[in-house]
Image (tube, coloured by chain):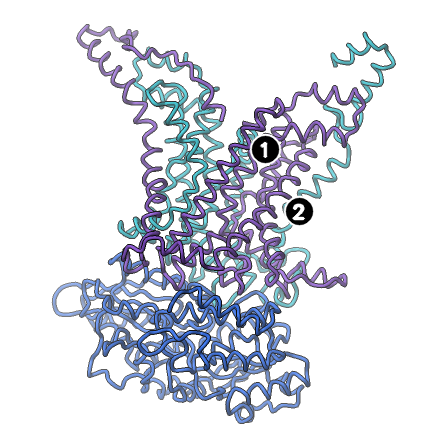
Chain colours: A purple, B cyan, C blue
Amino acid sequence: MTASTRPTTSSEPSGPAPAPPSRRTPASPARTARRSRLARLDMRVTPYVFVSPFFLLFFLVGLFPILYTAWVSLHDWDLIRGQGDFVGLANFEFVLGSDNFYKALRNTFSIFLLSSVPQVIAAILIAYVLDANLRAKTFWRMGVLVPFIVAPVAVSLIFTKIFADQSGLVNNVLMGVGLPAIEWHSDALAAHFAIATMVNFRWTGYNALIFLAAMQAIPREIYEAAIIDGTGRMRRFLHVTVPMLRPTIIFVVITSTIGGLQIFDEPRMFDTGGQGGASRQWMTMTMYLYELGWGPQISFGRASAVAWLLFLIIIAIGILNFLITKRIAHSGGPAKGTR
Amino acid sequence: MQSTAAIEQFAGKGAARAARRRLKGGGGVDARPRWWNYGLLAVILAISFFPLYYALLLASSDAGTIARNPIPSLIPQGNLFSNIGEVIGSDINFWAAMVNSILVATLTSISVVFFATLAGFAFSKLSFRGRRALLLFVIATMAVPVQLGVIPLFIIMARLGWVGDLKAVIIPGLVTAFGVFWMTQYLDDALPFELIEAARMDGCNLFRSYWHVALPASRGAGAMLFLFTFVGSWTNFFWPFIILRGDNLTLPVALQQLQASYFKDYSLIMSGVVVSVIPLLLLFILAGRQLVGGIMQGAVKG
Amino acid sequence: MKFTRRTALAASAATAATAAIAGCSSSSGGGDGGSGGGDIELTVATFNEFGYEDLFAKYEAENPGVTITHKKAATADDARANLMTGLAAGSGLADVEGVEVGWWAELLQYADVFEDLTDPELEGRWLDWKVEAATVDGKLVGYGTDIGPEAIAYRADLFEKAGLPTDRTEVAELLTGDWETYFEAGRQFTEATGIPWFDGAGGTFNGMVQQLTHPYETADGTPVPLAENADVKAIYDLLVEYKDISGGMTQWEEDWTASFQSDGFATMLCPPWMMGPLSGNADGVEGWDIADVFPGGGGNWGGSYLAVPSQGKNVEEAKKLAAWLTAPAQQAAAFAAVGAFPSQLEALESEEVTSSVNPFFNDAPVGEIFSERATAIEVQPFMGPNFFVINTVVADAITRWDGDGVDPAESWEQALTAYDELGLA
């Protein structure tokens, strides 16, 4: 967030703009005055015009819908009939009193942890391997990024075949070497693992590049000092590199929280039914939202309650993250990561 | 190697030689990588590519073979093109979905670059009241899970009669907070005030300054933003899945429909996967260098 | 009969369980009758294959001034979503909309948004239960297109291994009776071969529950508390009793699809539209046949209607077209084109239908068999607004022990809790 803290040293005077002395066409004094007025207006108004498209669109398709979600959540509201009676917090009561909500919460966090923790570790290790004076650097970097361009739906279709219980690749290999097959769908943890694998497949290389950038920003003198001290490769990695990466790790975790808690594509595609299994063992919050709103219940009211609850959870975690980051930034190392 | 020179001065030649050896040897800062670096990277790349290769194997086989054996073959078989042809000609209008995906991704990417550079120009180089607060607001919105507004968004689109219409997917993506933030940061560093001043001296109004100075100056960052937005749009599923209908889909939704088909032919599903990956893969081969550079320059995450 | 659609629909909207019930077949819509005055444009929304394409051209030729636009969704799921949103928006629907029978569960509570299609002249055109399923308070909201009368598809080669009869007439005799008869034959089969008798308890449950007149709700739509639903519990218990002869697979999932190639099971419940997916999945496997029998009498799975939303501009012309498309002659033509099995009495007896055979199923006279199965059907189960949510609860409970290894009694307890949480009472 460096941009927000770095004041722009504007050389433009905020007072009356000097009349532009036209070098090409000598202008009459009256014309110059008019142009000067226009120029002043331009300076004053145009910046707002320039930034307005973002704000307009954000209010229309971002902020307003989120606030309106709260309104919908207080009503009996179905897909076809639209707005019904005001029901107060009944939709929230329904959702909070439903097992499925807690299952969805559990699954979402479980999948998130299974994807973010191994992913950060793997990404740092890959970055470490990439952080050498390699031949064909760009080739290797592009190589690890390839999975990122594959749509989650496509990734999920491939992995669903790999993780099929009886006809899948992994289980056939396991059984081929005499190991028991894993119940990828009926066992909740196994299902979460399978889904997390899809997420990891797509994002590890991407995060590795972020860590690589952060590693390269670590002043070489620090390494040199450690090397001269005779610190071994392993210790250098654990005691120099990793601590220096802390801000980046936090950044990666924060950004993946916002997306990770809204995960939908991969678990939705994990089977054909798309409801998250018979015991809802891999139904995530967003899938629950979808099922309530567009499934047989067609209840926008209840779906909105879920949306709003998830929204609050994400915001709460965001604030928590922010506070932790702040503390660490104060006590942390000198490297500001990649920001 | 100034540090070793210092060591030589203070600790003698032997120590300096040892230090130099350590610096050059295993895992030194600028050491030449060893064979295991390449070996490991090859393994990592193999893992990255394996699922795609597996998709290709299945796509080039046929339903019966796949059902009987999870690894139908080790090298691609001959059915790839006939399978792709069949997918493209199926009821799920894959060809139309491809055209739609290209349209949506191109339009949103161009628009994001245009509007984000415009706002980035204002935020980084112009002074106006509330600039700082507005910029902070932009940054804060990056943390807002806008996806959760789908229900009202759906209601709005239904009112407008845009359900099933590509407009419903394109318009919400026309400019992003990330894009604005990214361009602001970039222009802040990369665009000297002197250039804008010069343009103004020439009588350019702000829009012309933007058009003739800021936009060309941000080509590198703009290319990265374009690619990044393109990938995001191409792979987007949740909202299109809700709002798009019938014969007017984007590729990820078409893939989902393929999976939901009555008669599930895995060779066809995987052909669909292959078809959906190829355009982006080509783009990536051409311009992936910029994407890599962009990701490493800014801590970006979609 | 050509039934090789590769991309017909599968899972209906929300769930695989829903899909199992909603099943589906083809439906598509048609043209508009040209009336004397000026040009009329009609749109018809369909999904999967209805085989109406040629009929549209015919209708346009017979009714000058009428142009028909065909909007075809690839899956029923998609078509349902489209219909629901169009109703929600109050505009944007086609003049004639294809409706899968399962959707009535949700749609009948909004019957006022559809035109009343009651027409004395058309009385007696369809099978009684087909009409009843689309009638609410005396108002007919859809003209029947096709139906899904169920028979039993079986692997004659595996039957032979087990020492069971293989000829379809003898198999029909063997399996005639109630569900226990069917399961007992299965136990004998599984003991002899070690191969499961049917694909999965979920699909079988679906066939059984559709024989109940009021599976989950009373005639006025009041949900029957699951804990008091003796009929459904009896079916559940019966399936549990025979859980050892189930293949444990959920229909439409990867393993189910793959199991057709690996002798995964010997029999399955088969409506006409299932012949396509079955022969596709079992491509190259020899020995499939179809017997003219269904445990517990007749049963229907899937089938569609044409409805006319009131929001259309040409409702009268649209009604005319819908009536024409669902006339026996047209449905027989649709059957010939894509295998949509007609719901019209006259069409069921037509030459096109009765003479059809299917080479994949050992040249079984499928037209004759399914016509026979259609007349055996006595009820179309009542599907109220809560049908799908409750059915999903029960189907999930079955999948839990059939596929996921949970104890059946415990799974039922979980279903009761899930039912309570729906908050329907």
Q: Secondary structure at mark 2?
A: helix
Q: Crowding near pointer 1: few (<14 within 10 Å), some, many (20+)?
A: many
Query: What residue is pinned by disc 1?
Result: A210
Q: Quadrant of the N terminus of chain B?
A: top right
Q: Does residue C78 appear anywhere in the picture?
A: yes
Residue at (65, 79) in percent of width and height: C195
Q: Secondary structure at mark 1?
A: helix
Q: Crowding near pointer 2: few (<14 within 10 Å), some, many (20+)?
A: some
| Residue A270 x/y as whole percent | 54, 58
Residue type at tag 1: Ile
The chain identifier of the residue carrying mark 1 reads A
Up the image or down, A331 lies above or below B258; here it is above
| Residue A258 x/y as whole percent | 49, 41
Along the viewing direction, whichever of A279 and B169 lies nearer the viewer: A279
Query: What residue is pinned by disc 2?
Result: B47
Along the viewing direction, whichever of A36 and C136 lies nearer the viewer: C136
Location of residue B95 (image quadrant): bottom left
B83 to the left or right of C93: right
Using the image, tell me which numbered label, if any, was put on residue C87.
none
Location of residue C302 (image quadrant): bottom left
The chain identifier of the residue carrying mark 2 reads B
| Residue C423 x/y as whole percent | 40, 65
Q: Does residue B72 appear anywhere in the picture?
A: no
